Image (cartoon, helix red, strand yellow):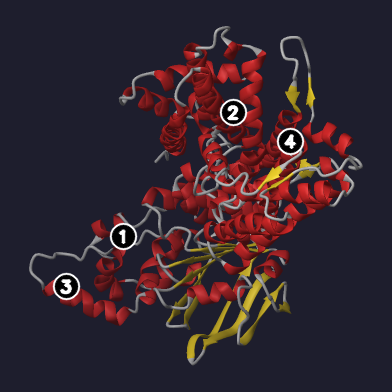
Amino acid sequence: MTSADVAVAGPGEAGPPPGDPPEADVGAAEGRGAEAGVLTRALRRPALGALLGAVAVFVVFAVTDSTPQHLWLTQTGFQAWAQQAAFFGIMAVPVGLLMIGGEFDLSTGGMTGFCAIIMALLVGNEHWNAWAAVAVTFAFGAAIGAVNGIVVTRSGLPSFIVTLATYFVFRGLSVGGVLKVNHGSTSIGLTGTDHPGLKSAKDVFGGSFAHSNGLPAGYQDAILWFVGVTAVAVWLLGRTRFGNWVFAVGGDADAARKVGVPVRRTKVLLFMGTSTAAALVGVISFLQSNTAVSEQGVGYEFYYIIAAVVGGCLLTGGHGSALGAALGACIIGMALQGVIYSGWDSSWDFTFLGAILFLAVAVNTLTHRRAMRARR
Amino acid sequence: MTMLLEADGVGKYFGNVRALSEVSLSVRAGQVTCVLGDNGAGKSTLIKILSGVFAPDEGEVRVDGAAVRFHSPRDALSAGIATVFQDLAMVPLMAIWRNFYLGSEPTKGWGPWRRFDARAARAGTREALAAMGIDLRDPDQPVGTLSGGERQSVAIARAVHFGARVLILDEPTSALGVKQAGVVLRRVVQARERGLGVVFITHNPHHAHPVGDRFVVLNRGRLLGDFAKDEIGRDELVRLMSGGAELETLGHELERIPGIAAPTEPQAGSAPSDLRAVPAPAESQDGPEPAQTHAAPVSTESQAGPAPAEALDENG
């Protein structure tokens, strides 16, 4: 189905920008009694731009791949970027939902690191059962999201500011707190040998699967979590009442309130979604590496936001797609790994990301405008 | 016929300011009661009382003859009184069908599998719109791409679909062009045909007269008159609601300015000659076409009457 979308939309997208094709299309869409044109329908899908972008980026790196065995097109290359994409995507998808709901969360990056530190302290230092530590970490994540959400919805302050404050608090805690507890070291690992439940927890969160001759290390479990989170988000957004409310509170909170949508509750739940996902990332990263480091994850909140925007989520809320945010994460994963595979200087990563972000916003705005073009 | 909704001598103060006093009106099933008045006449205070936004300080509101006290628009809604406010409570970026059921989404499945029944919502939207004679090509269209009249129509269809018995429309035609206003007036007639009582708030007598059965005219928070259709003609309505004497003076003043044959405002234009010429009750049987009684400014009126053909037919 997706390939059909691409095939149909291809000419319109690739063709020269000047006036003719759009006008012809609008005329078709206006046709009396006809359903909206295929192109208009495709353009209304926010994930389309991200899909085209992902394909484009993939092809670019397939061409520029400078590894001896052309690894980009093998399992090795796929595993590399998929794994990177998974870490961004588990966050980008709920961040995208929150953005559709009209709010921002800047505390996400710091939260992932802080949750990893909680895991490390409980499992590594305190020798808790790993599953109990996982439960506590998730509960902590959910609670922080609830606090963020309640403060934002009750105070009427912009979420940008509120979560920026949360972000700094956690950043400070993850340095100062860890130094204090950990006697001057910023890295917490496993101490001793007695770690109940650690092995089974690792199997679920930090393990790997599908080992083969081509790829002895297999794929990380994180990729499955990424797929799972995306699937749940797609379902929530497209097929539940809650999803309808998310679009509504982001599009016009007043109108939503008037028809009986619980605006505050919806937003608080969205904040809890991002922070719980941050706990998941923290748990996974600790169980993969057995260590947590102060300030890990700091700065990543912008990757998540970039992924969501690249995926077609409107910065002002009310429009977007979970699948798009996931594809956005794939684009970022491919970009960061592709630079390495192509043998380019990775100091240019950020420039590259900036260009992608700008392009994505431009494409989104254009397609969105066209899809929303009023018939008068 | 039953009185669906009545206001009896209602009044409202804001601090020391008397926004509304001693106003009464009634709506029957299958009738349109128009509330007319200039800006500041108290129209919006009156509908806010009727729709449960606030309670009256004096008088009472009755539903089916029984006194009620609404504490919120929800209360009014559960009594079957739905209000379509000017902002329509719709989210422009969302598809029509998502908007239509927003806050009252149909679901299927159970527990964690409980989901928004999108198919039922699409079909239901299409059906409800069709029942109101609204033909939209594509329920997946975002509401923001609809024209103003279409948007009003969808909001009205939504209120009707969710079981309203009384429909309160807050200036539904005020921001619309002539053609779009006609579309909305058609919906008003359709709601009436379906047996709803309609309270139609407007400051435009040319919109009110073709579709209304009763006309309640407000001025500065007071009731200026309450007429059945056969008691008042359109021009009398125009004169009444804009304060006849003031308008007459204005008309004379404007006539003295060289180069202005007739003022451009339709109300002002028709007023001076109509004041004496129109015997109010006599002509109203023929609907709002008072051309025979006066000769002068017919041309200025033509732009004012967007009355759709159906609406006029219904009245005949």
Residue sitting at x 40%, y 71%: B237
Residue sitting at x 40%, y 65%: B204
Local SS, label 2:
helix
Q: Locate residue A115, reporting x and y percent.
A: 72, 49
Determine whether label 1 and label 3 are within 8 Å by CB. no
In this picture, is B71 found above or below B200? below
The subunit carrying tag 3 is B
Determine whether label 1 and label 2 are within 8 Å by CB. no
Q: How far apart are marks 4 and 3 (CA)?
A: 87 Å
Quarter of the image where the N terminus of chain A is located: top right
In this picture, is A185 found above or below B238? above
What residue is disc 4 on?
A289
Local SS, label 3:
helix
Query: Which mark is nearer the camera, 2 or 3?
Result: 2
Query: Do the residues marked 4 and 2 share a common chain?
Result: yes
Q: Is A346 positioned to the left or the right of B96 in the image?
A: left
Sequence order check: which comes first, mark 4 or mark 2?
Answer: 4
Residue B164 seen in the current view = no
What residue is disc 2 on?
A330
In front of the other: B263 or A243: A243
Kind of residue at badge 4: Ser
In front of the other: A295 or B156: A295
Q: Residue B291 carries which label?
A: 1
Crowd around label 1: few <14 · some 14–19 · many ≥20 (10 Å):
few
Q: Is B283 positioned to the left or the right of A73 in the image?
A: left
What residue is disc 3 on?
B254
Query: Do the residues marked 1 and 3 share a common chain?
Result: yes
